[in-house]
Amino acid sequence: MDMTYRKLGPSGVKVSVLSFGSWVTFKAQVDKDAAAEMLQTARAAGVNFFDNAEAYAGGESERIMGEAIRDLGWERWSYVVSTKLFWGIHDDVNMKNTLNRKYLLSAIDESLDRLGLDFVDLLFCHRPDPETPIEETVRAMSDIVSAGKALYWGTSEWSADEIRAAWGIADRLGLHKPVMEQPQYNLFERTRVEREYRRLYDDIGLGLTTWSPLASGLLTGKYADGIPTDSRAGLEGYDWLKDRVTDPDANAKVKRLKEVADDLDCSLSQLAIAWCAANPNVSTVILGASRVEQLQENLGALDVLDALDDDVRARIKKVMRGS
Ligand code: NDP
């Protein structure tokens, strides 16, 4: 099936229903040449959105993506690229874990410098910051958009109340409104997207760029017998992931999902990704991959979308409920 494109929430810009991001992988597992190969593989399949963040590999992920895209010679108008700000990379009281104006206005310039770009298309507040008034953040993000350094702004892992508050402030003050949110969404993590944000889709037209469709690889079945040495949970610094991906209940469900995938003649990862993309409130599912073969396999989820009829969905629901 050919790539399809969805409007990013209330904006006029369209993103491919499958997109590609660089968390964990760029720098730690993927160097510039491999990044270029993966970016080109995604683009050849119709992917037009590429996700990044200031914090990924301490800024190196932005540098690698920027250089790889320059090497590939892509025209700036032909792709949508994001970055995200919050954690900061300077060890300073005003530059860490914050969405204050001083940080945001300085961090965007540094991100653009690393990416080698004049603007990003999408700029996210990577987490909420309870210490900075939402109005200060909204004004700063709107000013960044007005300055032409980002075309659209949004949030990541904000509560529905926080998103609604930001949108209301921007509406009242005539500022650029947030148009998208970046939440985790996969077969094991559904509450925010399906319940908490439910009213926001109609009320403010919220768009979603969702992350970790495979729950960091758990939904590929690769953790059924422990942690492969060449996997994310085997990487140094990712101990926090180990318990989650080797959880016996979760892996028992994944094993049963494999039967559904087998019946559809697709892989587990394709089934799990297609399931995310089948939610019409999802604008784009951001894929992650440490190898080009994984990305190729995952892009094949497009061919599974039409197979997710009511019967298949009911089977998946039953498995995930443990019934
Ligand atoms: P996934 O849950 O899909 O995990 C991707 C990882 O799973 C790969 O790096 C690889 O890891 C493994 N994998 C992928 N496909 C296969 C396959 N076919 N077979 C075997 N293993 C496979 O997505 P991510 O967690 O990477 O998230 C995707 C993107 O979302 C990120 O790159 C980032 O852009 C965004 N994101 C945003 C966040 C936010 O806070 N806003 C947070 C997290 C992600 P390995 O080979 O190493 O095991």
Image (cartoon, rainbow, N blue to C red):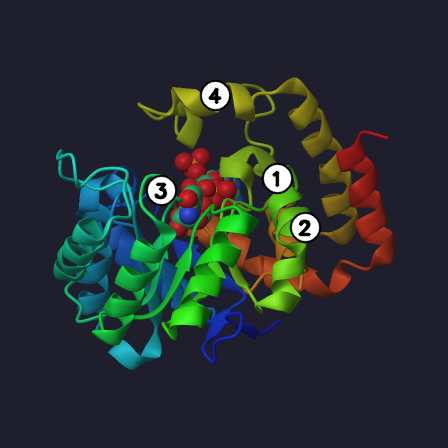
Q: CA distance from mark 4 to mark 2?
A: 26 Å
Above or below 68: residue 121 = below
Amino acid carrying mark 2 in the image = Glu
Quadrant (top left, top right, bottom left, bottom right) of the C terminus:
top right
Residue 52: x and y in percent read 32, 53
Q: Residue at x 52, y 57 (%)?
A: 164
Above or below 58: residue 76 = below
Residue 264: x and y in percent read 76, 52
- In-image side of 191 versus 71 (left or right): right
Amino acid carrying mark 4 in the image = Lys
Amino acid carrying mark 1 in the image = Glu
Above or below 159: residue 79 = below
Give the secondary structure at mark 4: helix
Q: Residue at x 24, y 40 (%)?
A: 57
Q: CA distance from mark 1 to mark 4?
A: 17 Å
Q: Which mark identifies residue 189? A: 1
Callout 3 crowding tier (Cα within 10 Å): few <14, some 14–19, many ≥20: some
Amino acid carrying mark 3 in the image = Asp
Q: Residue at x 53, y 53 (%)?
A: 298
Cβ atoms under marks 1 and 2 closer than 8 Å: no
Give the secondary structure at mark 2: helix
Label 2: which residue? 194
Give the secondary structure at mark 1: loop
Residue 183: x and y in percent read 51, 48
